[in-house]
Amino acid sequence: MKPTKYNTIMPRIALESLKLIDLNEIVRLIGNNLDDIFNFLANTTYREEIISTCGDLIEPGLLEEALFQNYAKMYKKLLNNSSKYIKNLLKSVLHKFDALNLKTMFRMVQAGMNAEDILQHIIPLGMYDRKKCQVILTEARSINDIVDSLQKQDFGFFLKEFIQSQWLLSDLSPLEAVLNKEVFKGILKEIKNLNRQDKKIATNILGIEIDALNVKTTLKYKELITNYKTLKENLMPVVEIDEEVLESAIREPNIKSTLQCFLSSVEKKHPVYQAIFTKLVEESDSPISRLEFILEKAPLAMSFFELKKNMRYYNIGYILAFLNIKWVEIKNLICIINAIARNVDANQIHDLLILPENY
Amino acid sequence: MSADRLEVHPTRRELLVLKRRKTLADGIADILQKDLEALIISVVDHREKASILRKELYDVLTRSYNQFIEAEMVSGSLKVKELALTTTSLDFNVEITKATGILGIQFPSLKLLKKEENEFKNRLSLSDAPIQLERAASRIKAVINAVIELASITAAIRELLEVVSLKRRQINRIRFKIVPQLDKTIEYIEYILEEIEQQDAIRVRVLQRKRKERAEKSYETD
């Protein structure tokens, strides 16, 4: 991508970065009550969404929704300021949230819930926002109806094909897995359209997210002793950790050996992969939730690495790193909000916040 | 407790019958008291069992609830609520049968009837559900047996307490109503019989005196 192509998006990223909340201030929120958090957020970039969504009622669900709305607004600004290939990539990344909303609709329609209740669980992100979902749900009585109404849109065609070919109505898992796969295939496809440098950076930042997802699924399989077929269905398109490595890791007898298998496969690969898997092996005796937490940090670690490495040039790394940081900020705020609502101990909250290694 | 006396004829025969009834009532009260003691021991045993089970249950549920909160912190309350609302519910039923316990009392016995299910089939989405939620759900699943057992013991305690209360009422009725009533009636009959005896004695003495006077009079006229 030519530097001129970054003319509008880079100032926007710089502007939005300035609006990020200082990490120390987020950590200081631990121990406050929901009113204090509301007041704090009302003086930040989240002000507009917090006030319009919550009104007089301050509860975790509404605060979460306001945070998502803010993310959606920021994402929209970035899309408007992006040029063709960056825009396409950002749109493909946004499909993750489309898939989440579609899965929510599928699950809730199958559970026999009404449209009003379903809409409360729709994340205001992506093309399937509340308005669009309301239109779909007013006419849909079953999953087939939903898929029929999507036919002309992005996921409609392949979902229809999948349902007709092999899907059993009772089990949503394959349908959800195929939707996730399509999203990540779309992201990898859009990465290919970028130029050499951007392609490499985007593959690393978005690729580690997909790989981390596959490792998480494998660890869950090991922990929950679930169906092998379900595991295979839920493995996403591979990036750095290929299918062969995944297969041999799955065959390993325990979690420690599985992680060692992953570590040996990334020994000659990217240093962030090495660092992440070394840490995973070191902590392999910890509960799976801790290992998942380490994997959760992987995209952020990769973003920072790529930022430092490619600081001299305009590149897609800035955009993806910013998106990751913003998402982590929202996740941390959600963590604190829910913990405070449930009177969780401050140390436990601190342990579940996604913070830099040396914080 | 004041007791009314029974409406009976104050005869010696009736007195004997009442005394026999009193001895019988005292015997029954003693037997009932022994039953009551056995029942109370059984209630205490059941209560101890229930207490241990309840503590274990609360421990598991607390751990499960903590995992649930952690899942909310990691994935957000909206996602957890959505997954909770849409997960397939556990398919099970409870069969109620009767089991014979102490003193032949019939307790309701609860038995968990589970449908044959695929152990490897996940109830929650493998990709979307946080591991904490999976853990919380599996703990709850494992705890159902303990819930059923606790319900069974609680039902037995309820049944035992009802029988204890019934026995206590029976004992009280005998000790504080029937026995005092019999005592009062016996006392009354004894009193009446004594009165009759005294009147008879006076009457005999009067008759003897009159006879004596009549004899003296006829002697004088002769």
Image (cartoon, coloured by chain):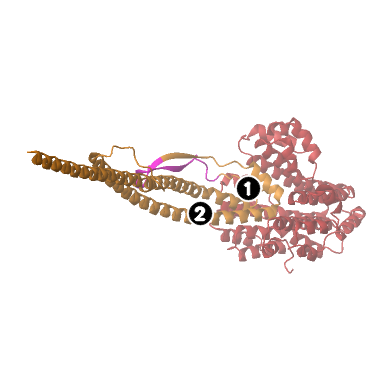
Chain colours: A red, B orange
Is B105 covered by the magenta stretch? yes
Magenta part of the protein: which range?
B98-120
Q: Nearer the viewer, residue A76 or B132?
A: B132
Q: Nearer the viewer, mark 2 or mark 1?
A: 2
- Image x and y of residue A254, in percent: 54, 58
The circle on residue B126 is: 1
Q: Residue furthest front?
A: B221
Q: Earlier in the sequence, mark 2 or mark 1?
A: 2
- Image x and y of residue A4, in percent: 93, 54
User: Left of B178 or right of it: where is A62?
Assistant: right
Q: Amino acid at mark 2?
A: Arg
Is B128 covered by the magenta stretch? no
Which quadrant holds residue A17?
bottom right
Dot 1 surroundings within 10 Å: few (below 14), some, or many (20 or more)? many
The residue sitting at 72% across, 63% down in the picture is A272
Q: Tell me which chain the residue with mark 1 is part of.
A: B
Total marks in image: 2
- Image x and y of residue B116, in percent: 49, 40
Q: Tell me which chain the residue with mark 2 is part of.
A: B
- Image x and y of residue B4, in percent: 38, 42
Q: Quadrant of the C terminus of chain A?
A: bottom right
User: Left of A109 or right of it: where is A248?
Assistant: left
Q: CA distance from mark 2 to mark 1?
A: 32 Å
Q: Is residue A304 above or below residue B156?
A: below
Q: Nearer the viewer, residue B91 or A344?
A: A344
The residue wearing badge 2 is B54
Q: Secondary structure at mark 1?
A: loop
Which quadrant holds residue A107?
top right
Q: Is residue A317 above or below residue B106?
A: below
Q: Amino acid at mark 1?
A: Leu
Q: Secondary structure at mark 2?
A: helix
